[in-house]
Amino acid sequence: MANPNMVAKVEKYLGLFQEIRGRIEDPAVARTILTEVSKDRRMEEIREEKEMRNGEPATTRQLEYLKNLGVQVKPGLTKKQASLLIDEALEKEEE
């Protein structure tokens, strides 16, 4: 039996394709539009996933790299904060 989530996604895309086909006569153009819409949706999901991960604690590699760069690290540093500190330290090295 098929995964219910996958079936729901397929139904959603079929409906979207039919809606596009109602506006666009050429099926190839309709498929291309559907492909682009799908890419946009996936990119948004990736952005949301990345934002969620950015609130996680900094990785050991980030902390070690910051130490090697001579940056003082406060406890509870997040991945996003560590990334920003690394960027700032690298910019200062370039100056």
Image: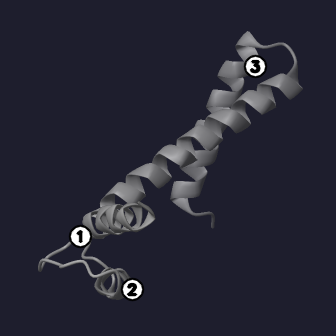
Q: Residues within 10 Å of mark 3 (few under 14, many from 20)?
A: some
Residue appearing at x 11%, y 80% in the figure? 75
Location of mark 2 (residue): 61
In 3D space, how far apart are the residues under numbered discs 1 and 3 (Cα atoms)? Answer: 46 Å
Residue appearing at x 44%, y 50% in the figure? 47
Q: Are marks 1 and 3 in contact (CB under 8 Å)?
A: no
Secondary structure of residue under mark 2: helix
The quadrant the C terminus occupies is bottom left
Horizontal side of 26 relative to 1 (left or right) equals right
- Give amino acid for label 2: Arg
In 3D space, how far apart are the residues under numbered discs 3 and 2 (Cα atoms)? Answer: 49 Å
Q: Are marks 3 and 2 in contact (CB under 8 Å)?
A: no
Location of mark 3 (residue): 21
The quadrant the N terminus occupies is bottom right
Horizontal side of 43 relative to 47 (left or right) equals right
Residue 19, picture quadrant: top right
Residue 12, image x and y in percent? Answer: 58, 38
- Give amino acid for label 3: Arg
Residue 36, picture quadrant: top right
* Residue extending farthest left: 75
Horizontal side of 26 relative to 86 (left or right) equals right
Secondary structure of residue under mark 3: helix
Location of mark 1 (residue): 78
Q: Is residue 25 above or below residue 90?
A: above
The residue closer to the viewer here, 13 or 74, is 74
Dot in front, 1 or 3? 1
Q: Earlier in the sequence, mark 1 or mark 3?
A: 3
Secondary structure of residue under mark 1: loop
